Image (tube, grey):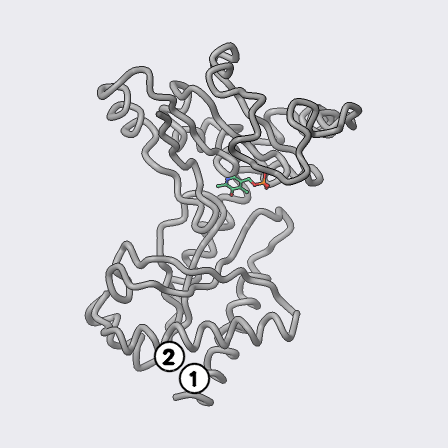
Amino acid sequence: MAVVAYAGDSRTQTVENLRAVHDVVREEDPDIWLHADACWGLICAFSERTRTRLAGIEHYDSVTVDPHKVMAVPYSLSALLVRNPVRLRAISSHSDLIMQEDFAFGQVTPFVGTKGWLSLKLWMAMRARGRAGLAASAEHRIGLARRFAEILEAHPRMVRLHEPDLTAVAFLYVPDDVARVLAEAPGALDEAAVARINGINRRLHARLLAEGRWHLHQFSLPDDLGRLRRKAILYPLRFMATNSRVTEQHMEDVLAYVDRLGCAQHEEHP
Ligand SMILES: *Cc1c(COP(=O)(O)O)cnc(C)c1O
């Protein structure tokens, strides 16, 4: 049996309480394999100020990290860190039982022997920036996400859906009438009102992709914190601060743009 905890999931980059997960699992059975997915969370590891968010990860059996996501090295560069590599034998196999690929040739698949020196770019990034440089870059980008969260907070028609742990911030555009309701009573929307807000944000996002001036990702997300309606499925937009060159002006501009598209969608489909 294995338990996997996120140090930054792929949507909101929320970091789970790694120490608490560890304590619960180890108390139940010390042999359960503990894996932390830190593909995003790696960004916290370089700075003393941010690494506390990963507290407990040092006790996990394995950790995945994605330097191509957070260290500004070109795609692809992922790594699996294993506390005790010998124990990996427990899950290694020559069987094709899991993948069941039609064109797999059993033990000799994949038919690749020669590989590029992928780790060279990681080594060069580490040498070029040093621990202090990587720490500064991580703190800067996490700070940008916090700043974006504040700008959202001050905006009359934007609702932020979570506390940003890393560099992602998910939010929704809401028209003035809904913003007034939520200011009085957060989480008070009924299902029809949620469907209306989702409709506006989905059309807004389609427009944004069609125009191609800005890019924000959209996905479904349960409203765990009850910002609109607890457990409702929402379709937010997501800002990402993984690019160090993002400025405060960019943040203001993209929100003004989203606001304009949102108002237009709301007028077309009141
Ligand atoms: C991106 C991601 C991965 C791995 O994706 P690759 O970019 O293909 O390496 C794994 N877990 C999470 C949470 C991710 O965000």
Amino acid type, label 1: His
Residue placed most toward the observer, 220 or 121: 220
Query: Which quadrant would the N terminus be assigned to in this image?
Result: top left
Whole-percent x and y of residue 88? Answer: 50, 16
Left or right, 82 with reference to 58: right
Check mark 2 vs ligand 1: CB closer than 8 Å? yes or no: no
Residue at the image position 61 percent from the left and 54 percent from the top? 246
**Nearest to the observer: residue 112 or residue 109:** 109
Q: Quadrant of residue 121?
A: top right
- Element type where label 1 sits in the image: helix
> What residue is shown at x 38% (from left), y 88% (from top)?
270
Indicate the quadrant of ligand 1 in the picture.
top right
Camera-near label (1 vs 2) is: 1
Q: Which residue position is annotated with label 1?
A: 266
Label annotation for residue 119: none
Residue 66 placement (x, y as % from top left): 58, 35
Alpha carbon separation for disc pair 1 and 2: 7 Å
| Residue 264 picture location, percent across and down | 49, 84
Numbered disc 2: secondary structure = loop
Q: Position of residue 229 (x, y in %)?
A: 25, 65
Q: Estimate how packed mark 2 is, as few (under 14), some (14 to 19) or many (20 or more) residues with alpha carbons within 10 Å.
A: some
The disc label shown at residue 175, or none: 2
Which quadrant would residue 196 be assigned to in this image? bottom left
